[in-house]
Image (cartoon, rainbow, N blue to C red):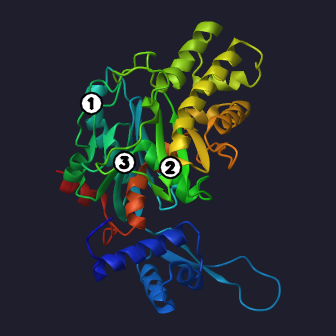
Amino acid sequence: MKDAGLNNTTLRRQNRGLVLKLIATEECSSRIEVSKKTGLSKMAATHIISEFLEEGIIEERESLPVKGKGRNPIRLCLSENAPKMIGVHIFRDECSVVLCDLKLHVKMRRKFAVTKESCGRIWEQLYECIDAVLQSAGEERLYGIGIGSLGPVDVGRGRILNPPNFYGKRDIEIVSMLKERYKLPVFFDSQYNCAALAEKYYGNGRDAEDFLFVGISNGIGSGVVTGGEINRDFCGFTSELGHVSIDWNGKLCTCGRRGCLEMYAGSRVITTHLTEITGKSYDFRGFCEMAKEEGDSLMHQVFADMVDKLACGITNAVNLYNPQKVLIGHEGYWLPGRYLDKLQEQVNRRKLLGDYHEVKVERPAFGENSHIVGCACSLLEKIFDGSNEYVSGPCRYEQIILAAR
C-alpha cells in the first residue's frame, strides 16, 4: 500500500490518463459514458475532454447514420494527429523499433538481425534504427519511448540482467542509455509483460481480469495479469515461467538449474528434435504447418510430449494465480488447434480447482507478434495511469537528434 498522499496535480494526471484510456480503447465514446464509467462529474469529464480536443489528442466524429429523425450521434475517438510512441523490442535473434499510435497501430518498423558475429554492434544498430524511425516520424509529437526486452529484467532499475544465450551481454542499463541519448521519457518492461498489456488493452485479454500470457520461443516467457493489472514483485523483477522446474533431476538449463520448462518445450528444442526425426530443415512454424496434415506420426508424438510438458508448467502457474484464460503466443501461436485443445484439457484436468471453473487456452489477438506490437506498452501503461504527460509541441527529428549529440 502506498503511504504518499495525492496532490491536485497527481489527481489531474490520473484522471486525464483514465479518460484517455477509456476513449482510446473504445470503452467509452461520449461524455456521458466517460462520466458514468469514471465517477467524475459531468463538468469534470467535459473539462478533460475539452482539453484533449484542444490539444488534438482526440476528436469528435459522426457515427454511422441511423434510421429515423434526429441528428446522428457524435462519438469521441483518438485523433490521427495525437502524439505517437516509439517502441523498442530487444531479443536475442532480432531487435525492432516501431512507431505506433495509442491503439498500437504500427506506422513504421525497422529491424535488424542479431548474431554472434554482429552482437558487438547491437547498441549502435539499435540507435541507427531509432534514428531512422524518428527521422521518418518528422514533426509527429511523441509521448516517449517504451522498451520490451528479453529477460530476466529489473524493471525498477531499468536494466536487462543476465539473459541466457545473449552473447554474454548482461547488466545493461538500457533505460539510462536511451534517456541520455534522446532526452525523451523512457519506460521499460519484459517483452511478455508488454505482450500481456497489449492483449489486455486491445486483444483477447479485454474480457478477462486475470490471465496468463505465455510466449514460446527458444525460451519460454510469461506475463501475468491479476485484477486487471500486470503482476510485479516489490523489487521490479518479472515472472519467469520458462525457469519453473518440472523435473528436479532433469536436463541442465543454461540458467544453471535443472529441469526448467523451456528445456523441454521451447521452440528451438522442439525444432531440433523434429529435424532429427524427419530430416527436414523447417522452422517451428513450418513444422506446425506440417503437423496439421501428418497427425499419426512421430511428429505427433513430439508435439504431444511438448503439450504434456507445457501443461505441467502452466498448471503450476494456474494453481498460483487462478486465471480465467491462458494466451499462447510468440511462436506458440502457430501450434495446431488440436494441440491447444489438448493443452486446455490437460491444464483443467490437473489443476486444483478443475471442478469449479474452466481455464480457456487461446491464441492472442495480435498473433505471433504481440510482444513486438506491444513493446511500447511499457510507455502506454504510464500514459494511461497518468504517470507520463506527452511532450508539448511537435518533436522534430532534428531537435531530438541534436539533443542526442
Q: Secondary structure at mark 1?
A: helix
**Picture coordinates of residue 240, whole percent (x, y):** 42, 37
Circle 3 residues within 10 Å: few <14, some 14–19, many ≥20 = many
Foreground mark, 3 or 1, reads 3
Label annotation for residue 189: 3
Q: Who comes first in sequence, dot 3 or dot 2?
A: 3
The type of residue carrying mark 1 is Arg
Seen at 54% across and 24% down, the residue is 265
Q: Is residue 202 left or right of residue 382?
A: right
Q: Secondary structure at mark 2?
A: helix
Residue 152 shows in the view: yes
Query: What residue is shown with label 1?
Result: 121
Q: Who comes first in sequence, dot 1 or dot 2?
A: 1
Q: Are marks 1 and 2 in contact (CB under 8 Å)?
A: no
Label annotation for residue 196: 2
Seen at 59% across and 69% down, the residue is 26
Residue 137 shows in the view: no
